[in-house]
Amino acid sequence: MGIVVLGLGPARAQYIPIYVDPPPIEYIWNGVNGGNSGPYEYYTGHYDWLSGSEWLGGSVPPDGVDVLFPDSYKGAQPRPIIGAGKLLNLRSLWVEAGIWYTIFGDQLTLGFKSGEVDPYLLVVNSQDLQNTSEHRLELDQFTIADYHHWRGVGKIENYSEGGLGIGGDGELGSGEINLNNQHIQIGGMGATHFWGQLREGILSIEEIKAGLIPGGIIDVGLFGGVEALQPQPHFILQANNKDWNGKLRVNARGFAIIKADQALGIRGEKRVYNGGSLALRTHLGAALGYMPPKDGTTLQITGAGIIRREGTDRIGALYNDGGRTRFLMPVQFSGDTRFGARGDRAGGLELAGRVYNNGTGSFIKVGPGLIMLNNSATGAGANSWTGDTVIHGGVLRINNANALPSTSNIVFESGTNGPSDHGAYASGPSYGGILELGYAGSGAGGVHNFTLGTGPGQLRWEGSGGFSAVGADRTVTINGGANLNWGATPHFVKSGDALLLGSRYATHNITLTNGIRTGAGIREIRVERGVGNAHAIITGELGINADNSGYRKTGRGLLHWSGSGNFSPKSTSRRVIIEGGALRLPQGLLADVSLRLDGGVLGIDADFTFMLGSGHGETIWLNGGGGFAAYGGTHKVWFPGGSVWLYYPGELRFGHYTADGTVDFRLNLTLGTGGTRTIRIERGSASVPRADVVLSGTLSGSAPLWLVGDGRIDLSANTTNTGNVSIYGAEVRLNRQGRLASVSKITLAHNGTLFLDDVGTHDSQTGGSYRADRINDDATIVLQGGTLAYRRSSVSPAPEKVGELTVTSGQNSIQIFPFSGAAKGSFSEIHATSLQRDASSRGTLHFSEKSSRLRLDTSASGHNINAAGGVRIMPWATAITAGGWVGRALPKRPPRAVSTTSRHWILTTRGQMTRGRHRAMCG
């Protein structure tokens, strides 16, 4: 048997078999005549098991022999399909990975006339783990020969990273698997899928005397084996095994996955031993509901689970491996046991049945995903354990008041304080867990009241952690609302750890009513982005009571700290640092702190004047960049100096997904020379269209400017900057006096939009004004998956003109909106020097809006791709609204619409360039 040593350090070196030496095998498949002989010849490219010419030696394997499918053969099919007939009885089946084999037929029995103890029944080998392939046994019935043929533990092992599928016609799982009450062991390092339905086992008197159990036993991994000396097999149950009454034991390093209701069957032992993991896997679009077995069978689990990838933590004895599952089977855990979930934003594991521990041991939530406790029963059916409830990572959601036992102490674990008694340690404050509240608390107004301590029903921080809300806004009060001193109040957040509020799964606001004081240090409060506008609120005081201390706001979410400031005793260098998302503070409090922008934005509720600097009452931009977001209307941001330098490499940021207002940024921005300047805009939550920021000041300098994000920025002043402008994702509107007339190249990419608007303002579809030459007449517009839009007012004396329009990649559009009250037959236009697209480009252009025209100074006929016949087409450009079209200007004609009898090129509503007569065009 081949072995490999996995380098896990001298104390944990693992010696794992990677190759099983087969016995001497006489019958080796050598498929030659694919599709040419036997009863399966009507399957093109298929081979016939029953044809002697397909086997080395020329003989079809008889019953009770070993058969090998090698990693090379004479045939040319890379994925041969072999029809096996009605009945095959083999001692064992061996496959060398490298060729993707499929065997289909009525029935295959393995272990036939074996006469061995602990035989190999089915093995997929991979020389040095180099060859990988998928193998499928698509059988109406897959059978293990009964105990008259062999005794002990029969082995099915897959050492290829490709899966081994058994039973039925693939994933449909319509076949049947009969263990004949035998004991099998799933091994290897790859995945073994049981597609077929496991059959109920009924014992004969003889089998009872022989010590067999009904339904047989499936061991995933070696039962009772040393963890370091065995591989980590994957075993996947994909059928509803509602009548299977055998034992399933997931042993150390074993990884079993269920993908269907009742996959575990009924009766018998269903157990995960220490070091093994049972996972539930489904797809986000098809949630799995696992109902209680009809006989009330309980799943028994213990331990921390497998290490799925070296260098990472153990995933849990029960694990959600993707999608959303509602699991109603009772779960009994013993000792400290981990429950894990991967981080699907729309997925999670709901434990709706009883979860209990009759002895000691803690319930430990691990992994970045969501686990929900949703058993509302009381009495004998209630969730029950006396050990701690430890939230080591991700989110543990409590959906009702009975789901979390009052006999358990809640612990936020991990962080930087070293291993705990539960062994769930991960370095760095970025780790931590959330207790998500899905029901109203018992306090007045539904408040959740917690006390700090180590006793039943109490709460303590041993690492980073906190709260979030789902279903409705929730409020938390700790220790009756007393101020909490970071690093000093017993069992509150320790130095080096973070207070976490909100989660990716949160649907509503979470409010903490306590005041918080820093003590000595910079304290991190992290708020995750939830669903919609869910955010975090702290109504207690913001206390900074030591020198060189303050708060760091991290995470993409919003923290609204509405309490007063407390700076007693007065300290020096009181800092508030915004590293992510948004932070809203009472503006009066900002006079007493140094505001530092390092990746996030300050949320403002009124006009705001700031001074540059690092002292109290001053604002400084650090390397992460930052800026402002407005709430409740349009709010001006002033700087007494009137002009500031937009530095490199940081970013100026505006907006936040929770913000519903507009920042009126009334500063002149100097871009300077050299290096790229970046302004990032995030789309807000306003119910009507409005800008997230309007730059009322000017832009100057020659450095390139990137406008990025998914939000809207309006330029309302005449700018003089000359560097290239690139718009990535964001929407840039030029309205009122807004111009980019000195810019010679503008790139629109990744859904970026340049909107020339003579009609609207930053918060209205009316009230705008005409401004000539918003774009330089010779400016090149490069379209890389972007949109050029133009809305002309009835008083605009002349249309907008640009230089070359170049389509380079992506799906692009030009939208020209007609002005209100336009006379019938009149058009809105953009003039362009030319429309260009390289022959190797795959970009497309959609031209839209009724009664609008793109007029070119050069003939569109230069864009013909198909010149055959009398009709030439431009297949990459289409009109998507009736009435929109492209024409060319007649040489030496004034820019006016004419009728002509000459042939010309227009873009018709059928989306092709055609030659036509007597059609209006640009002349």
Image (spheres, rainbow, N blue to C red):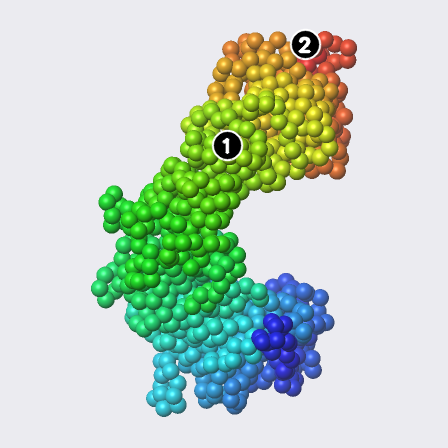
Q: Residue furthest front?
A: 569
Q: Earlier in the sequence, mark 1 or mark 2?
A: 1
Q: Are marks 1 and 2 in contact (CB under 8 Å)?
A: no
Front residue of 392/749: it is: 392
606, above or below 348, in the image: above
Residue that label 1 marks: 617
Which numbered disc, 1 or 2, marks the residue closer to the eye? 1
Secondary structure beneath label 2:
loop
Front residue of 619/656: it is: 619
55, above or below 412, in the image: below
Q: Amino acid at mark 2?
A: Arg
Front residue of 654/125: it is: 654
Question: Alpha carbon of mark 1 to alpha carbon of mark 2: how far?
Answer: 59 Å
Residue that label 2 marks: 896
Q: Amino acid at mark 1?
A: Gly
Which of the 4 image quadrants contains residue 922?
top right
Whole-percent x, y for residue 518 in the image? 44, 47
Whole-percent x, y for residue 318 in the image? 42, 65
The N terminus lies in which quarter of the figure? bottom right
140, above or below 847, in the image: below
State the residue at coordinates (25%, 48%).
443
